[in-house]
Amino acid sequence: MSRTQQERSAATQGALISAARRLWGERGYTAVSTPEIARAAGVTRGAMYHQYANKTELFLAVLEAIETEVIERLIADVTAAQPSTPAETLHITADAWLQIAVEPEIRQLMLLDAPSILGWAGFREVSQRYGLGMTEQLLSAAIEAGQLKAQPTRPLATIVLAALDEAAMIIANAADPARERQEVHVVIHDLIDGLLGEGS
């Protein structure tokens, strides 16, 4: 049975995203051309530009796929850990994110390439669109459990998410990311404990 145009389009997009993600993850955005991506995806350049107007648009599609995957992984890690309190959930989520941030592909695409390609405002918009809701839910749960004093959760979530993103940036740009993650881990845990009033 022949595929519909929508199915063919989705298959082409999937092949392009997969190829671009692999090549950019290995060598970085600027080192890989669109013709090379098209060849790796097994499609023509015309087919590629029919789906994505330019290289930046394809990168955004790759980044969206990665952001979705990261959120799914964070949820899976928290579920597997079976935290007993919202405070513990905050710590587990932060640890999981800092662990993911040192992975070469995530480091290259999300933390090194994305800010320079999308600009800080564009990078921040994508980060907040995917991470802000989850962060706000975690903080709301901590407030409801009496582990965090009542306060507006949206601005607090924005600040906490920014701190986690900045922590990941520090790791991404470090000469020794694994060692830097250990040091940043301590700072982030102290920050969370300070919010929860557990450091006093």
Image (cartoon, grey):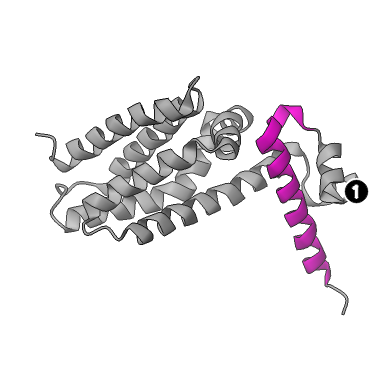
Q: Is residue 55 positioned above or below 143 on the image?
A: above
Is residue 31 shown left or right of residue 187? right
Along the viewing direction, whichever of 102 and 12 lies nearer the viewer: 102
The residue positioned farthest toward the bottom in the image shown: 1
Q: Residue furthest left?
A: 200
Residue 86, given in percent of the width and then of the height, sits at: 23, 55
Residue at 22% in and 50% down = 87
Q: Is residue 79 magenta?
A: no
Closer to us: 182 or 14: 182
Give the residue type that dot 1 points to: Thr
The quarter of the image holding the N terminus is bottom right
Query: Is residue 57 at all visible to an observer of this figure?
Result: no
In the displayed orientation, state which residue is furthest to the top: 175
How far from the left and from the top, in percent, is residue 193?
19, 39
Bin the neighbour count of mark 1 within 10 Å (Cα to Cα): few under 14, some 14-19, many 20 and up: some
Q: Which residue is mark 1?
A: 44
Bounds of the magenta segment: 4-32
Residue 29 shown in magenta: yes
Asked whether residue 135 appears in the rendered view, the answer is yes
* Left or right for 40, reference 185: right
Mark 1 element type: loop
Percent position of residue 171, x then y: 45, 28
Quadrant where the C terminus sits is top left
Magenta-highlighted stretch: main secondary structure?
helix
124 lies left or right of 114: left
Q: Residue at x 77, y 39 (%)?
A: 54
Residue 4 drawn at (x, y percent): 83, 72
